[in-house]
């Protein structure tokens, strides 16, 4: 066995662990160590994905004959390690300058990353659950550090904790099912488990609910916890939460599916429907959100929905024994997870910076009447375009792949599946369209038109270089993910090969119509083809050639004039400018059946003619209600009153201490069962 | 004193059915012109009135050179509220006047018309001018209402000077006013069709309007009826019988065509959908805010100067008054369509019963022989195409103008427009604006 | 109810004017709204009473830009009324002002006009008119004159406009707006002043709100006299900016400057 990767892996662990320990003393060292750990992780996972080794198994402690603490590195989980480390690298870099919170935040941030590394590498259920639980709890404490109204932050944090623990319960249920059929906790490192159909379905449903809760997809919550929790955390924490914490959900779900080795028809249907609904509702709610970080959080729901849809196609295709389609759908899911994580982290970081500058999370709140150009707008534009699926950026390639796999739903051997696939395809297409509204909104009102660097004095100008560096880091990644699509496809496919059990890269990536080999991505045997690289070259030509002609071939005179406000003076206050609320009000009014929009214009036209009458107030209210929110509000209300009465009787102590106690007790119980049962 | 109107010392109580139409100062006394809607009477009163800032704009003359926001008062509060500037340079409104739309997107919460961008101060300019020279300015106050303007002014001046004007001239003035009403209503309908992108309807209506303008040019010498009116007479007398008959035939052909076509135009559901329920003005609001003209009649206010303040020919002919109760854009459109018909009917009567003999030579200098110091003041009300137009004139010993106060119809209709647009969406704006037939030139006289 | 609009249209025939291929009919340029052009032998003295805006300086000099077509002079049979000969309406303000540099300016004007030979977009700005000029400009879109057949279109924003059509007597409140609108237009651009008010102030020349003729505030290329000018006259002014006038008319136009 080659020792170098093990050493690098050890390095990753050491740097993260040191960073957690040192966080209290020095933020800077903590983040630098985090950056080093992420860089090591990137190199390690790249080495694995490019064929360095097939499987690295590290048995830390052989507890009994068939159960052990075990770390496992395969191409599949090294793909997720790569995505996470790429995000963390940028986030740590950004936090060097962004973080002005108490020192605890840096430790917690790195602790969350560390837990995720444990989740990804876990070869047994115990280490997985330990990582899962410590990730949830450290994220909970991170959200508590958020700035805003204390009660809002507390509510957000406890919501997160509540849904996080619910997720843990369902994941445990899934693991119980797997344990019962394998008889060992090391089922994550075995290939396929064999069990009765009922047990398999049990595992499927429990894992869908458990991981789905973490991803924030449709029926398990809608507008409630994920957007609230993610948007109230400090921005570097939100980036970690939205880009990688939900990625852990994707990882867990696909990982468990890959071990089932068998699929049922209704699994596919449920997955498709849940994914489609999440995508559409996420997009719709994103388009009416006014929170500069809540909007990206809703968009996370949309993107997770798309990933789930692709997984659904994968399940159905494997049910109908269509290896080509199932392979393509799985790679599409992984590719989309990749591109979404990178873009979303970038968006959260930029929005966090902008919110910090204007000291408000309200998209409506524009601090100035002029456009702000502080170096992040370029990265912001690439991010938005990627999330809105504009070629040739990352988001387009993956969404194209997902839609192409849905287009091929006619290959399913059953009319019902074909209909379900077609309808979900239409819904997904609608969702990717609607999300453009949200993205243009967040770019226009969030990135371009708000947050002047100068507004807060020199302090922020000093911070700019690092912020700009991190934004350019993500800009390069987003462009590379799109333009170098065949390379990324290679990484994703080598990650998927382990599940598909065959090499798929050469089937899907060829040359076509004069485009050299390894540059066209095919979506079937031949169904659709697309070359992001050449599209990028073509688009670049479209930009460069006219520019060159006008620059050198013609007279070129630039005259600057004022903006045009139909002949009136330049606006002096932000009240005179179009705002983001107005931008999405038509959607609120048109879809009032969905949003339950309540428009209340309470007014008496105060008429001041020669005689009589006094002015009266106009009060305008427009609120968007969410059915799910109402339901969960009701549930929370009863649950809270119940737990309040229960807690007062049972435990009048401090909640934080109690939570840590729960975690310790949980680990203890797991270990106890481990020893007793083995 | 004006012979027909005794200035009332007291109006016991200004109830809601009495509108204050105009206020002016003569020799240091403030007089108010009230319209008693219920009894269809004009009252001249000198009771002291509480005047607010807004009423100054409405009822008195303001200095030119700066814009004025016609704010109805009331504060707008709420999340996401912003102001949306519209005008003074815009394509929807071809004149220089603005609107400030206060909105949270899509829905108009409140709308503030901005006027006075092109206030020319005609009322100040004409002081000390000969009435006939002043006429050149007055008929150019609002080009598309010029016949109403010149007739209104000329009638008031003639009353003061006790001029013997041949009744034929007065009948011809009425003919010109009705022609003006027809082409203005056609213009409004055409603009409404354009707003709804009913291109066939718009094209057909604009063709008919152009033909009326050409008739104006043919029989009155000017497409917009400038310059045919003089103090003491008119310049075009429609002497021959053939001329009168062909005028009637031509105008009848046009309006018949319009009434045939309008049934088809209004059978388009898309068009009707845009008109119905748009910018509803309740009867009470219309009364309170002093709406006049077709827009007031569409809100069930039975006031038409041709009936309630009839000058010469209107006493001898039958005027058909049409009102509607809905108060929406559709009602205003229907009232206008009906008024085209009734105007043709009026033209038929006017051309038929017109006194045959006696046409006055047009004179430039008005002699002040018959000047009576006691009756140096008079006013006149004319139903212009978009409503009641009031001119109050005072003339000094030398026959020159001492005071001119104009209260155009558009000025008082801005607030009803603003009020009725509340709660409508952006795309309804064009329909509401066009249906009132307002003109900035009119209000910025 | 169904109506066959195509048949209806065919039955109606072609209403659109033959201009600029043929001379306009007298109906399209009403005789009586056309300015007088030549002086008749007469004993009348020219005074304020005869010409309230002072367009007639003496028997030989008539400033069309000031004429408001009040017809007092024609009532006094002071001038001929001849519609067909007097249709020389669209003048270049610059050429009018600098008679010496006539030819250079005219050549520059021609090259600019060549740019817009196929099509352009116009924006109307009202700086204090009485609404008659506005309606006449809007009338250009009706089937009788049909602007779009010549490749001329209305636009909403000065950022898209090639030609600025100015109507009305320049008001204090609109001066900055006019300047701003002109600034916002991309180069090359034309400015057309329409009506006596825009060209000279017309009847509103002495009001307190009047600032100056439009050409004193922004450079004006073409003026179209009239009160209001008929749509055909406005069309003529627009076609001048496209270098698409009726043949032989341009030379005629320059010559008429020399004479008047």
Image (cartoon, rainbow, N blue to C red):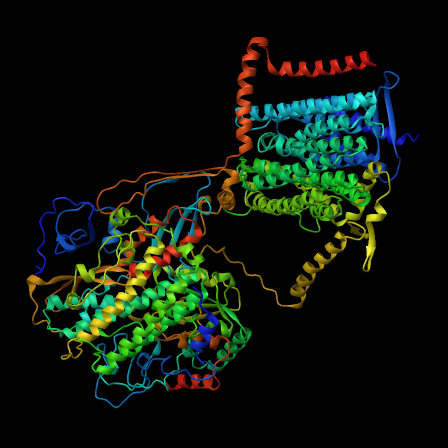
Question: Which residue is painted at 79% across and 49% down in the image?
Answer: A524
Residue A323 in the image: state x and y as whole percent: 82, 43
Height in image: B280 above or below A359?
below
Question: Which residue is painted at 44% across and 42% down in the image?
Answer: B81
Closer to us: C251 or B225: B225
Residue A88 in the image: state x and y as whole percent: 72, 34
The furthest residue to the right: A1
Image check: B57 left or right of A83?
left
Q: Is residue A310 visible?
A: yes
Image check: B207 left or right of B389?
right
Quarter holding the C terminus of chain C is: bottom left
Residue C86 in the image: state x and y as whole percent: 36, 84
Height in image: A402 above or below C141?
above
Image check: A152 left or right of B101?
right
Q: Quadrant of residue C94?
A: bottom left
Height in image: B292 above or below A211?
below
Question: Count the marks: how many?
Answer: 0
Q: Quadrant of residue A462?
A: top right
Q: Quadrant of residue C84?
A: bottom left
Height in image: C251 above or below C215?
below
Quarter holding the N terminus of chain C is: bottom left
Closer to us: A288 or A466: A288
Residue B219 in the image: state x and y as whole percent: 27, 78
Q: Is residue A345 visible?
A: no
Closer to us: B295 or B220: B295
The furthest residue to the bottom: C41
Image check: A488 left or right of B14?
right
Question: Which residue is painted at 21% across and 65% down in the image?
Answer: B126
């Amino acid at each position: 066995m080659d020792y170098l990767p093990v050493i690098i892996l050890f390095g990753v662990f050491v740097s993260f662990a040191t960073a957690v320990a040192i966080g209290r003393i020095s933020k800077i060292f903590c983040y630098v160590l985090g950056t080093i750990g992420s860089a090591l992780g990137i190199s390690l996972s790249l080495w694995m994905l490019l064929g360095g080794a097939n499987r690295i198994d590290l048995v830390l402690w052989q507890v009994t004959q068939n159960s052990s603490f075990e770390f496992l590195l395969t191409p599949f989980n090294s793909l997720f390690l790569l995505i996470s480390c790429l995000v963390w690298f940028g986030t740590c870099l950004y936090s060097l300058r962004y973080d002005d919170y108490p020192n605890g935040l840096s430790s917690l941030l790195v602790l969350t990353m560390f837990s995720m590394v444990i989740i990804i590498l876990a070869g047994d259920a115990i280490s997985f659950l330990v990582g899962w639980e410590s990730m949830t709890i450290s994220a909970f404490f991170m959200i508590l550090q958020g700035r805003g109204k204390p009660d809002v932050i507390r509510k957000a944090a406890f919501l997160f904790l509540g849904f996080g623990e619910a997720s843990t319960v369902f994941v445990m249920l899934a693991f119980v099912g797997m344990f019962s059929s394998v008889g060992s906790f090391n089922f994550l490192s075995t290939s396929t488990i064999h069990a009765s159909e009922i047990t398999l379905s049990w595992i499927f449903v429990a894992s869908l609910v458990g991981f789905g809760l973490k991803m924030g997809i449709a029926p398990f919550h809608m507008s409630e916890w994920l957007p609230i929790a993610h948007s109230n955390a400090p921005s570097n924490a939100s980036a970690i939460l939205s880009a990688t914490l939900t990625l852990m959900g994707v990882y867990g779900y696909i990982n468990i599916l890959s071990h089932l080795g068998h699929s049922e028809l209704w699994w596919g249907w449920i997955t498709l429907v849940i994914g489609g609904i999440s995508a559409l509702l996420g997009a719709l709610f994103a388009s009416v959100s006014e929170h500069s970080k809540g909007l990206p959080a809703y968009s996370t729901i949309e993107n997770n929905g798309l990933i789930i849809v692709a997984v659904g196609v994968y399940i159905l295709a494997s049910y109908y024994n269509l290896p080509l389609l199932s392979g393509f759908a799985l790679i599409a899911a992984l590719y989309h997870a990749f591109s979404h994580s990178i873009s979303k982290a970038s968006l959260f970081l930029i929005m966090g910076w902008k919110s910090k500058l204007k000291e408000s999370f309200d998209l409506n709140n524009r601090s100035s009447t002029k456009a702000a150009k502080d170096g992040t707008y370029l990265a912001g534009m690439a991010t938005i375009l990627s999330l809105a699926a504009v070629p040739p950026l990352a988001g387009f390639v993956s969404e194209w792949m997902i839609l192409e796999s849905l287009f091929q739903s006619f290959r399913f051997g059953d009319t019902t599946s074909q209909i379900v696939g077609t309808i979900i395809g239409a819904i997904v297409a609608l969702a990717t369209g609607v999300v453009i509204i949200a993205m243009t909104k967040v770019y226009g009102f969030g990135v371009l038109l708000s947050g002047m660097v100068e507004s807060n004095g020199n302090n922020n100008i000093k911070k700019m270089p690092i912020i700009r560096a991190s934004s350019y880091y993500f800009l390069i990644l987003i462009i590379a993910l799109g333009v170098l699509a065949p390379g990324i496809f290679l990484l994703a496919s080598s990650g998927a090969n382990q599940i598909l059990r065959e090499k798929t890269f050469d089937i899907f990536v060829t040359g076509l119509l004069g485009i050299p080999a390894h540059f066209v991505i095919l979506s079937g045997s031949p169904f659709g083809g697309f070359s992001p690289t050449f599209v990028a070259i073509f688009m670049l030509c479209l930009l460069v050639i006219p520019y060159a002609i006008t620059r050198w071939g013609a007279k070129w005179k630039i005259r600057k004039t004022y903006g045009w406000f139909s002949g009136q003076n330049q606006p002096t206050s932000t009240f005179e400018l179009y705002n983001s609320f107005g931008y999405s009000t038509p959607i609120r009014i048109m879809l009032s059946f969905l949003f339950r929009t309540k428009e209340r214009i309470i007014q008496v036209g105060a008429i001041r003619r020669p005689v009589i009458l006094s002015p009266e107030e106009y009060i305008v209210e427009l609120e968007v209600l969410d059915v799910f929110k109402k339901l969960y509000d009701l549930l929370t209300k009863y649950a809270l009153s119940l737990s309040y009465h229960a807690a007062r009787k049972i435990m009048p102590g401090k909640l934080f201490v109690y939570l840590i106690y729960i975690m310790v007790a949980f680990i203890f119980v797991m270990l106890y069962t481990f020893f007793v049962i083995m | 004193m004006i012979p027909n109107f005794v200035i009332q010392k007291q109006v016991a109580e200004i109830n809601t059915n009495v509108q204050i139409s105009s206020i002016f100062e003569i020799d240091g006394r403030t007089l108010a012109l009230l319209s008693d809607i219920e009894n269809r009477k004009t009252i001249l009163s000198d009771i002291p009135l509480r005047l607010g800032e807004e009423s100054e704009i409405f009822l008195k003359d303001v200095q030119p050179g700066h814009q004025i926001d016609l704010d109805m008062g009331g504060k707008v509060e709420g999340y996401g509220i912003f102001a949306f500037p519209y005008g003074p340079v815009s394509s929807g409104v071809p004149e220089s006047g603005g609107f400030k739309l206060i909105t949270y997107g899509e829905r108009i919460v409140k709308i503030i018309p901005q006027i006075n961008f092109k206030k020319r101060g005609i009322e100040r300019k004409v002081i000390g001018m000969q009435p006939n020279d002043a006429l050149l300015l007055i008929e150019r106050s609002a080009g598309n209402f010029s016949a109403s303007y010149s007739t209104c002014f000329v009638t008031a001046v003639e009353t003061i000077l006790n001029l013997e004007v041949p009744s034929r001239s007065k009948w011809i003035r009425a003919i010109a006013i009705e022609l003006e009403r027809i082409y203005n209503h056609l213009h409004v309908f055409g603009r409404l069709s354009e707003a709804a992108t009913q291109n066939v309807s718009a094209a057909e209506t604009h063709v008919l309007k152009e033909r009326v303008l050409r008739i104006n040019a043919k029989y009155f010498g000017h497409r917009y009826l400038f310059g045919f009116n003089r103090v003491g007479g008119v310049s075009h007398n429609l002497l021959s019988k053939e001329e009168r008959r062909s005028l009637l035939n031509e105008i009848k052909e046009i309006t018949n065509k319009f009434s045939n076509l309008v049934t088809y135009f209004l059978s388009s559901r898309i068009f009707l959908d845009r008109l119905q329920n748009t910018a509803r003005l309740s009867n009470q609001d219309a009364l309170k805010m002093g709406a006049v003209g077709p827009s007031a009649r569409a809100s069930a206010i039975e006031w038409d100067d041709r009936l309630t303040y009839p000058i010469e020919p209107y006493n001898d002919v039958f005027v058909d008054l049409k009102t509607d109760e809905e108060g929406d854009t559709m009602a205003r459109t229907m009232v206008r369509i009906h008024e085209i018909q009734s105007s043709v009917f009026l033209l038929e009567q006017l051309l038929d019963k017109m006194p045959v003999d006696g046409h006055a030579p047009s004179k430039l200098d008005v002699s002040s022989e018959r000047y009576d110091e006691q009756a140096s003041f008079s006013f006149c009300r004319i139903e212009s195409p978009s409503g009641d137009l009031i001119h109050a004139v005072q003339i000094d010993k030398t026959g020159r103008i001492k005071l001119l106060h104009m209260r155009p119809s558009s000025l008082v209709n801005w607030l009803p427009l603003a009020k009725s647009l509340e709660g409508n969406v952006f795309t309804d704006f064009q329909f509401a604006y066009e249906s009132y037939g307002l003109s900035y030139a009119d209000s910025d006289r | 109810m169904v109506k066959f609009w195509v048949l209806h249209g065919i039955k109606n025939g072609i209403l659109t004017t033959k201009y600029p291929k043929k001379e306009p009919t007298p109906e399209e340029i009403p005789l009586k709204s056309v300015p007088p052009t030549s002086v008749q032998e007469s004993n009348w003295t020219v005074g304020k009473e005869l010409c309230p805006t002072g367009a007639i300086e003496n028997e030989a000099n008539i400033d069309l830009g000031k004429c408001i077509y009040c017809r007092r002079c024609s009532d006094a049979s002071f001038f001929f009324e001849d519609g067909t000969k007097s249709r020389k309406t669209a003048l270049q303000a610059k050429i009018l002002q600098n008679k010496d540099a006539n030819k250079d300016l005219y050549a520059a004007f021609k090259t600019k006009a060549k740019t817009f030979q196929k099509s352009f977009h116009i924006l109307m700005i009202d700086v204090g008119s009485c609404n008659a000029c506005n309606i006449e400009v809007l009338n250009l879109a009706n089937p009788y004159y049909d602007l779009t057949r010549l490749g001329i279109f209305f636009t909403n924003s000065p950022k898209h406009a090639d030609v600025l059509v100015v109507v009305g007597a320049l008001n204090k409140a609109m001066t900055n707006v006019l300047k701003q609108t002109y600034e916002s237009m991309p180069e090359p651009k034309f400015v057309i002043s329409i009506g006596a008010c825009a060209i000279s102030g017309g009847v509103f020349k002495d009001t307190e709100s009047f600032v100056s003729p439009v050409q004193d505030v922004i450079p004006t290329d073409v003026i179209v006299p009239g009160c209001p000018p008929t749509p055909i006259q406005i069309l003529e002014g627009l076609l001048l900016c496209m270098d698409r006038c009726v043949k032989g008319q341009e030379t005629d136009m320059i010559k008429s400057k020399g004479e008047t």
